[in-house]
Image: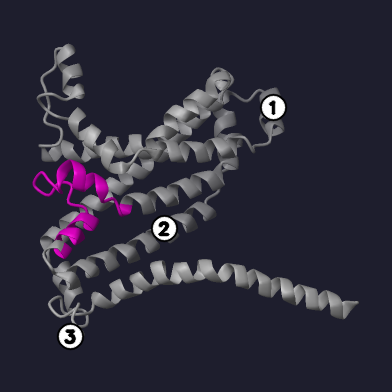
């Protein structure tokens, strides 16, 4: 009997690997292999990288990009934009989730969930084209609203001091629904008895939120923060559609700068930037997850 059970267990394990093999092959061919090739090109001469006999240059491409002041500026802008977007998306999503989950709007919660999530499934290019039109200084809806209030028009995307904020708002509108749904899912799993007990003890709404609700939402906050960090560090589409990295390199993110280097056939420098961003995403994502897991939320 034991031999039969062992044979059945062995067969089940082999069957699992058999079904997992196609997915593993897809991940290796279309995921890991391109990443490995990109990292390899970062150590090759740009002009011979795509030739049958590429020339190895070691860390020369990394030395070039780290000596480039525009790359320093793009890295700084990327980090600032990411910090703004992570904080804004997580905070706004949490507020929206708490509002939708409250008894006041719970009856129409499905409608609000639909409205909040629709931007997430809207194609990025289409959404950002609409936002670019809304920001237009002469014909945009936002400046029309400012004019109705008696305020002067603003060139949101043509000024270096406002372009980054403008695309941050557009990205917030585009992605906040995703994080809101994650928070709503976790709110539905909370233990209501804990909140009820705190209410009977005389705890205010703020005290229950800080000491009861937020500690239980810790996994959702961590997941949203880490995912948002990864999402916004590699932001690309909004810069292509709305600003082209301008004005005056104010939105020249690392991903867009690497794309421009690819367009100029500087493959070594471009992949060196992409590799640097890849390492940065992994390091900051792990650091944020580690810090969130170690923090005492009580």
How far apart in space, not on screen, are marks 3 and 2 (Cα)? 33 Å
Residue with the mark numbered 1 = 196
Q: Is residue 59 left or right of residue 105?
A: left
Query: Outermost residue toward the right?
Result: 1
Determine the secondary structure under disc 1: helix
- Mark 2, Cα crowd under 10 Å, few <14 / some 14-19 / many 20+, is some
Q: Residues within 10 Å of mark 3 (few under 14, many from 20)?
A: some
- Estimate the x, y position of residue 129 in percent, counting from the top left: 22, 37
Confirm or deny contact between disc 2 and disc 1 (CB under 8 A): no
In this rendered view, identify the residue nearer to me: 197 or 14: 14
Check whether the beta carbons of the residues at disc 3 and disc 2 lie within 8 A of each other. Answer: no
Expressed as whole percent of the image width and height from the top left, the position of residue 273 reads: 23, 65
Q: Quadrant of residue 210?
A: top right
Report the residue marked by disc 3: 55
Question: Distance between the Cα atoms at labels 2 and 1?
Answer: 35 Å
- Distance between mark 1 and mark 3 Cα atoms: 68 Å
Tell me if residue 171 comes above or below residue 287 in the rendering.
above
Mark 1 or mark 3: whose residue is earlier in sequence = 3
Q: Secondary structure at mark 2?
A: helix
The mark that comes first in sequence, 2 or 1, is 1
Instruction: Tell me which colouring the rendered structure shows.
Output: one colour
Give the magenta-colored segment's residue range: 233-262
Membership of 17 in magenta stretch: no
The tag earlier along the polypeptide, 3 or 2, is 3
Which disc is residue 158 wearing?
none
Foreground pick, 135 / 47 = 47
Q: Residues within 10 Å of mark 1 (few under 14, many from 20)?
A: few
Residue 132's spot in the image, x, y percent? 19, 34
Q: Quadrant of residue 17?
A: bottom right
Looking at the image, is mark 3 or mark 2 nearer the viewer? 3
- The residue singled out by tag 2 in the image is 285
Q: Secondary structure at mark 3?
A: loop
């Amino acid at each position: 009997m034991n031999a039969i059970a062992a044979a059945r267990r062995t067969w089940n394990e082999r069957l699992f690997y058999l079904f997992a093999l196609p997915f593993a092959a897809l991940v290796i061919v279309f995921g890991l292999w391109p990443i490995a090739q990109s990292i390899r090109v970062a150590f090759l001469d740009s002009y011979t990288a795509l030739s049958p006999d590429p020339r190895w240059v070691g860390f020369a491409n990394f030395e070039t990009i780290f000596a480039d002041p525009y790359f320093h500026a793009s890295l700084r802008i990327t980090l600032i934009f990411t910090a703004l977007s992570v904080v804004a998306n997580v905070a706004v999503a949490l507020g929206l989730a708490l509002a939708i989950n409250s008894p006041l709007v719970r009856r129409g919660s499905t409608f609000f969930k639909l409205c909040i999530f629709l931007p997430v499934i809207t194609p990025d290019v289409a959404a950002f084209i609409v936002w670019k039109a809304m920001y237009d200084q002469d014909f945009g809806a936002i400046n029309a609203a400012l004019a109705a209030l008696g305020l002067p028009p603003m060139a949101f995307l043509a000024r270096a001091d406002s372009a980054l904020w403008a695309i941050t708002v557009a990205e917030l509108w585009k992605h906040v629904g995703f994080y809101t749904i994650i928070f709503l899912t976790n709110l539905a799993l909370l233990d209501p008895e804990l909140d009820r007990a705190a209410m009977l003890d005389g705890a205010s709404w703020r005290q229950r939120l800080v000491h009861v609700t937020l500690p239980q939402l810790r996994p959702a906050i961590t997941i949203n923060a880490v995912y948002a960090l990864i999402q916004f560090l590699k932001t690309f589409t909004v810069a292509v559609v709305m600003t082209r990295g301008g004005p005056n390199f104010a939105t020249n993110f690392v991903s867009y700068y690497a794309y421009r280097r690819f367009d100029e056939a500087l493959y070594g420098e471009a992949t060196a930037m992409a590799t640097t961003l890849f390492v940065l995403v992994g390091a900051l994502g792990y650091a944020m997850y580690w810090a969130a897991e170690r923090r005492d939320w009580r």
